[in-house]
Each structure stands twice: as C-alpha cells, then as structure tokens.
Image (cartoon, rainbow, N blue to C red):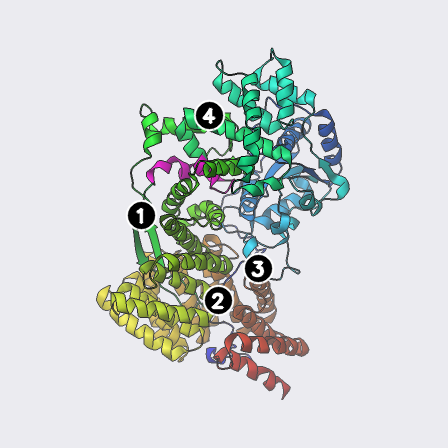
Amino acid sequence: MNTITFGDGNSGFQAGTIHGLVSTEFHYYPASEQPETPPNPSILIPFGRDGDFVKREELIDQIEHSCGRPGSRTALVGLGGVGKSQLAIEYAYCIRERSSDTWAFWIHASNSARFEQSFRDIATRVKLPGRQNPKANIFQLVHDWLQDEKKGPWVIVLDNVDDPSFLKLPGPNIEAAAKTIETSNQRPLISYIPYCQHGSVLVTSRSRGAALELVEHANIIAIEPMNEKDALQLFQNKLGQSDNEACTIELAAALEYMPLAIIQAAAYVLQMRPRYSLQKYLDEFRKSDRRKADLLGRKGGGLRRDAEAKNSILITWQISFDYIRETRPSAADLLSLMSFCDRQGIPEFLLRRRNDCTRGDGEQSHRGGTNDMGDGDEHNNDADDNESIDSSSDSDSDSTAQQSNYSNNDRFENDILTLRNFSFITANEDRTTFEMHRLVQLATLEWLRAHDVYEKGKHQFLVRLCAEIPVGEYENWTKCQTLFPHAQSVSAQRPASKESTKEWATILYKAAWYAFRKGKGIEAEDLSVRAMKARKKIFDKEHEDVVWSKAMVASAYGLRGRWSDAEELEVQVMETRKKKLGEDHPDTLTSMGNLASTLWNQGRWEAAEKLLVQVIETRKKKLGENHPDTLTSMANLAVTFWNQGRWEAAEKLLVQVIETRKKKLGENHPDTLTSMANLAVTFWNQGRWEAAEKLLVQVIETRKKKLGEDHPDTLNSMASLASTYRNQGRWEAAEKLLVQVIETRKKKLGKDHPDTLNSMNNLALTYWDLGRLEEAKTLMRHCVPLLQAKLGANHPNYSSAAETPAGWET
C-alpha cells in the first residue's frame, strides 16, 4: 500500500474540477509583507458625526445601559427612516469620547458581500498581518483579533440586519450555498463576531423577527418615531428658529415624527428659500394625500406591506424628487441610476461616466478561453468565451444641455451635492463609494414607474454596468469584486425590452465568468443559466450569443462535477461552431479543447487524447507553438500522457509549457502555476517525491498569495501534497492535510461531490497505512457507493476504489 498508480484511481490525486465555496482557517502572510506598528484604538465608521443630531435622552440611556454590560448584544428595531443607524452612530462616537481605549467598528450586514467588505476594512484599520492577501480567510483573521482581550475593548455596530439568513450560512456566497449545501455542521458567518467580555454588539434592523435571531428578546430596544419636542428640535437644528411654530408642529405630525422625513423636508425648504416655506411644504404634502394611495397602488403595491409611516416618507421623497427633476435633471438622472444598484458600496466610477452609455446596441467583441487539465487530483478549467462591450456613445442630451457651462467633474460633484443635501445618498468616508437607504431606492423606482420612464432608466443602468463590469479573468478580479454585488442585485430584475435584455444577459454572463474563475460553481451556474435562457428567447438557437452562453453553462456544470451535462452542451457548441465558423476556427478549437477536458474528467482518456492531438496540430498551424491557446492544449495533452504511463513525455512537454508561460504570462500567473502543479504530479508518479514536494510547496504558497487560501486551485495543490506525504511514509502529515481539504471541500462543493469523495478515499488509504483498519474500512464503504452514483460504474476512479475494500477483506 505504499505506492499506487494514477490508473488505479487511488494515487492521491483526483482528476476533477473544483466547485463551490470554501472557508478555510489557514493564515498565510506574504513574504513581502512588512511588520507594522499596531495602531491605537480608533473609530471605524463610514459616516461623520451629525452636528444636528437630536439626542433622544430616553433612547440613548437605554442603549448605553444595555450595551454597557460586558459581552452584550443589543438590537435597535424599528421602521426604516426612524433613526436607528443615526442612534448607533452617535452611540459609537459617545463611547469613543468617554473611553479612548475602546475600538468602534461598523459592519454592513445587508448582504454577504458587504459583510465581507466590512471585515476587510476592519483588518486594514487594525493592520492585521495577512490581510493584504485578498483571498485570505478575513473572517477568521478578524475573529481572532477581536477575541484577543489584549487588543482592548470594542463595540461593533451590525447595521441593517433585515435578513439574517446569510449570517447563519458559511462563507461569502450565502444565497447559492443555501440552495444546495447542508449547513448544520458548518460554521456560520455570525460566529466570526465572538462573544467575549471585552466586546459588545449593537444591531440595527427593521425586523423584530430578524433581531430575535441574533439577540435575546429582553435586549431589543424598539425605536419609535420622535416625540413632538424632539421633532421640533430637529426642525430647528436644520432650519433655525421658526416664526410659525404651529405650522412646524403640524408638519411634524403630518410626517409622523419620522426623523428621515423631517430631515428631507427641511432640506427641501432650505433649497427653495426664500420662495418656499414650511407652510407651502405642508400644503403640498396634504394635497398629495390623495396621490398617496394612487401611487402605492401602481405596480409598487407591495410597498403597502410596510407601516403607514413608511408610506408618508415615500410621498415626501416624491415631492423632493419632483423638485430635483425640475431644477437639476442631471442630479435626478444620477439618483435614478443609483436606485438600480445594490444600495451599498456604489462605486464612483460606475456613476461618473453614466452619460457615456445610452446606446446599448449589443456591439461585442469576444475571445475564446481554454482549459488546463490535471493539477494532481484536480482539473483546472477556464471559461470558454469572454465578451465585452464597446461603451462609447453620445452623452445624455438633457443633462449635458443644462450643464454646458461646467466641466464634467463640476457637474458630477454638484449632482452629488444636490442628492446629499436632500439626504437621498450618503458619501462614505472612503471618498469613492456611496450608499442609499433602501426606501429611497424604492421611492425613486416608483417615481420612474409612475412617469413611465422605469424601463428607460433600467436600460441606461444596464448599459452602464455592462460596459463597466469586466470579464472574469484574474487581472480584473479587483474591479469584478466591487461590481459583483450590483450584478447580483440586477440578476433578479429581468427587463422588458429586447435591447435591455441583451445587456442584462451580458452582465450575468460576465458575472458568471467571475464566479467561475473564483471557483463559485453554484453562483456561476445560476447566473450563466439565467443568461442562456434569456438569450435563447431573443436569439436564434445558433446565434453566437446563445452559443457563448451554452459554453459558459457547460463550464459551470463542469465546475460542479456535472460532467455528463457539460458534455451534452459542449458537443452542441462544438457542432454549431464547426457548422458556422469552420473546423479550424479558434472558437471551434476552444470548444474541442473544452470537450476533451470533460471527457478526461469522465475517465475517457483515449477519446480526450485523440481530440487534443487534433486541436494542437491545428493551433500550431493557425496560431503558432507559443500562443497561449496552443500551450494550454499541450499542457492538457501532457496530462493525458499520465494515463498511459508516459511520464517522461509528460515531463518534457510540461517543462516546455512552463518555461514559455513564465516568459509570456509571468511566473506567478494562475496558468503558469497550474502547469507547475501538473509537473509536480508527474514527479510524484515517477517516484521523485522530494522534487514533487518542493514544487508543490512553492505552488501552494504562491497560490495562497495570489488566489487565496480557499481557492479551488490552492486546495488542489494541498491534496496533491498530502499524497506526496503519504508516499513518503509521512502519514500523520498526510492525514492532517487531507482532513483539512475534505472539510473545506464539503463546504465548497458538497459532501457527495466527486472531488470530496476522492479526498475521503485517499484519507481511508492513509488510515490503513496508519494501522487504523476499521476507520479505513468504514470510510471506504461510505465512499464507494457514492462514487458509483456520481461517476458511474465504468469510471476508472470508481473501479479502483471498489476493488480496495475487497482487497482489505482478504
């Protein structure tokens, strides 16, 4: 049992594709990271202190009393716009004033993407070692820092927890994980905010039910509208002393003493002075009462599910928005654009060029992607096709005409200032992103519907986002990460028009590509399938957009181990491209390469090799020997040599590919690392275990730095290293590494994914080597039926796994 071969399927690596999401607890610190002096305690809140804040004494006392208890968890619950977040902000600043050794942090908890970003912001502020690795387990890093009493007391504001379901699921890809993965034994996100005596948590939520999932009933503080005294004080802070107190009292009552409504009304009056007054505002508000039921009954009737105060706020926003539309159309256009975004983390670059994209004619350019097979017990797969949009177009005439005397920058800043003055948006302290209240977005969208410009506004947003979101290649990941929440948000908003649907489908396609490259198979599948279905409805079945979408869905299927489904689509793509483009077209060759990859994963190695040889010969003639696509095919062919025992030939080919990729792509490029990992596996199969180990360690360290500790490729190399340890008789080390790989693969791929099962199979072999015979038999008996169900009885990996228990019984 000391050595086995690849053909037996128990060689310590599994040929397959890694999918799903992973949350590991490795902490890798890049060698280049310099030691930093720990900062002094400070406040990390993306909002400045409000000089006009009205201190509601009773509420402040309640908050301070509840949050003052060691290890407390308190929730502020109330209607949107009632002032929960403002109270939390004021409390945090008060804590800092009283105790300069206390940290104050702000965590956005409206969704998993923003939750993760807040953790990254904390890691940056406290200068956590390892944070500069963009794919490190940032949750564990921050958790461990918070847990350490030596770091000092802290308070966390967990803002906008309206749907806490994602906090109870593992990893950042929560919605997709909830659909397919059992989570009972997995660590939830909320657990990364530790219970400890030196830290307290203050939650804000619109839902009492949501709050009860995070705090005890006794620790919920209900935030109601202001009393009359406080509402009048807020009006005075914003407008100065009024000479018509009766009108102010009436207006405060009409606004139901809601702080946000009062702030917006005051901003509107200030903007229109001296030709406007509180009385005129009150008169207009009263007139719109009859409009209120009408507006809320048009398509947006779902808004009635909220309390009446919420509806009154909506009408207030409508009045202010009408004024902005009349006096500064470009600011109204900007607000319309922002209303289609995810409400948090709206990047400035997405807004500044909003007038550059009004055409949306679907003009696209594409290039093919290719696959790398192997990498030990894994298979590395690139997306089939990429696409982008030429976003140059005429500017928005309405906005440009009225701002012709200003530069683009002046116009943008003035538009932003207008929206901030009306409290419709908040500029974050990072100076590059903005936020909106959810109800502001809903009110704006309702206004667009009421004026029959909703679809027009959505189209302009889709064109803008489509032009900005890049393809999902490694070099674009930073921008993709910023825009991915906005692509996710729009994925549920399929437009009505054909032209808008084209842009919408392309956004989903690009987002799926990014999810695919990040190893998030569930999201990649969901987004790519939506894009494919949309394109099928508006294009002919052989239209290039439909073909590209099919290829992306096939890649997502492959990532999830659905190789039969992937094969079916890849055959369709290949045949269509042969017919439409010709057999030697680069896109056709890419499809053939992808199909070969899928065949290899299915254990059909001879068919895969035959197809790859054909692809290589054609690519050499058409593209040249050093073209990246040619190199990929050569690397894949080297992997097929493994199955024939042609180790020297595989080594020679891989060395050639590695050297060329180092020159063309760089030593740390993901494709170069994949070839290096495959070479390490070749060394392993030659019995050159020390050489294999040395190369794998190098690959793992670089992948942790470049891709992240929980990236599928990093896990693949770890599994290969475990196999190397096992063949050197270092069984304890192999066991430790395999257990880690299995646990993360269970979370990222699922308990019955082929790659998870292959790792469990290897762990069973390691147990046998350690003399833990019953554990080995039990685990193998568990794996074999599942492997048969997933791979089929004819797959080599299943066959060898099925033979092993029989051999142990003799």
Q: Which mark is residue 693?
A: 2
Secondary structure under badge 4? helix
Secondary structure under badge 1? loop
Q: What residue is rendered at 47% in x and 51% in y?
A: 491
Camera-near label (4 vs 2) is 4
* Label 4 environment density (alpha carbons within 10 Å; few <14, some 14–19, many ≥20): some
The amino acid at mark 3 is Lys
Q: Of all residues shown, which one is farthest toward the top?
A: 243
Camera-near label (1 vs 2) is 1
The image quadrant that residue 51 belongs to is: top right
The amino acid at mark 2 is Glu
The amino acid at mark 4 is Tyr
Q: Of all residues shown, which one is farthest toward the bottom?
A: 810
Q: Mark 4 and mark 2 in contact? Answer it, CB < 8 Å.
A: no
Camera-near label (3 vs 1) is 1
Q: Which residue, given by chain and number where applicable, does mark 1 sit on?
A: 361
* Label 1 environment density (alpha carbons within 10 Å; few <14, some 14–19, many ≥20): some
The image quadrant that residue 386 belongs to is: bottom left
Camera-near label (3 vs 4) is 4
Q: Mark 1 and mark 2 in contact? Answer it, CB < 8 Å.
A: no
Q: Is residue 356 magenta?
A: yes
Q: Which residue, given by chain and number where applicable, does mark 3 sit on?
A: 179
Secondary structure under badge 2? helix
**Can residue 446 be seen here?**
yes
